Amino acid sequence: MKYYVCILAILSMSWLAPTASCEAMKPEAVEETMRELPYVYTEWKHFTVKEGLPNDHVFAIKTEGPKAWVGTENGLACIDKLTGKVRSWNEKDGLPWRVVSSLDVNPKTGELWIGLFGGGLARLSGGRFDHWNQLNSGLVNDVVYGVAVENDNIWAATTAGASRYNTITGEWTIYTEKNAPMEEIWNYGVCHNDGKVHLAVWGSGVLEFDVATERWKDYLDPDGEMEIDLYRDDGIVHVVTSGASYVDGILWVSTYFGMSRYDGRYWRGYYAHETGLPSDFGNAAKGRNGNEAWFATDKGVGVVADFPTDTWVTYTRDPETLRGRAVVSRNKKVLDIIDMPKSIPHNYTLWVDFDNDDVWVGTSKGVGWGIGSGYYKGLKKRPVRAEVVAGMKSNER
């Protein structure tokens, strides 16, 4: 008899246990835990051909006041941030070449400088396009991957070296392996800030040009291994660099095999298997400050949100549901997972630009505008949902 009583007691408890568990997981019963977490962009707007872009394949974005300039595979566009209206230009509208690969704005004049993939260099000023190419100027090659304004000079990163155009004197200077430390001359990107110009070069790492002294400095992978990073944090993780961004004395670098950070003394390498990077294949790097940088990869955007604590935010889009997802992690441990109706328009990302608290992401399927309402730098204590904490503990087990 005692045997059957015990069996009935066990069965009773087994029926009651799930009920208690479900009660505990009701929304009104969910507890919250405070954690030091970074800001996460949860409000996004998308711009595609439906909104007026000439093409969804976006190579470059440059914000300027109320405007966001967009370079696409089939023309130039300008998004009015106040109205959401889009204006576009193609060859029939005077654009010298249809493929716009890079953009920069002269802060003194407001002129837009345009790198053309196969068409050279252009300028939009006062509603008129001016055009420079190999035949009418000192542009070293017509395939322009990057463009940057440096004081009165315009830099163009091309597949055959870099050109520097003085807009006051009209003088051109060409940099190749003959007068710069380029082991290869295929220049992928260029940026200027704080008196330094940085070139991202395929097979030559990153080259630094000091504007004041006009001297060069090269950053290469010291171990000389193309296949692996033999010695950790000894330099750039790879010499095939795709982008460079210099801000607050920090150099952020994207390569096809990982990312890097350099503070003038110490290097730090980043890989997908140990950080919040969605992929090691980097298309571009954009530093917001010395502790935050965004890396555009072929599988989403990886953000170093707080360098000192190695805290990341990874933005992706579910290809089936089309919903957005942001994963917050620290030292590869997931701290929070945020599901949202929208995030980046596509996981193949090619460009990032900042606009005060907002962020703009160029992808192969349009532009994503992340609205930074309440944005803050670094970390801040905020609540994490109990189910997320429970999920993290479950994963740890």
Image (cartoon, helix red, strand yellow):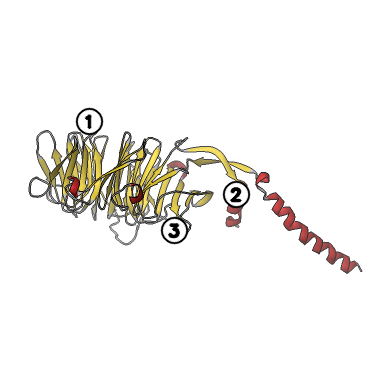
* Front of the two marks 2 and 1: 1
Q: Which mark is residue 319?
A: 3
Q: Compare residues 182 and 295 and report the one nearer the observer.
A: 295
Q: Secondary structure at mark 1?
A: loop
Q: Secondary structure at mark 2?
A: helix
Q: Given contact means CB atoms under 8 Å apart, are the residues at marks 2 and 1 in contact? A: no
Three-letter amino acid code of the residue under disc 3: Pro
Q: Compare residues 69 and 195 and report the one nearer the observer.
A: 69
Q: Compare residues 368 and 212 and report the one nearer the observer.
A: 368
* Front of the two marks 1 and 3: 3
Which comes before the other along the chain, label 2 or label 1?
A: 1
Q: Which residue is mark 1?
A: 108
| Above-or-below relation of 49 to 3 | above
Q: Write down the quadrant of residue 132 in the picture.
A: top left
- The quadrant of the rendering that contains the C terminus is bottom right
Q: Which residue is mark 2?
A: 389
Image coordinates for residue 97, horizontal then vertical, percent: 18, 50
Mark 1 vs mark 3, CA separation in Å:
42 Å
| Above-or-below relation of 227 to 384 | below
**In the image: residue 393, left or right of residue 95:** right
**In the image: residue 48, left or right of residue 334:** left
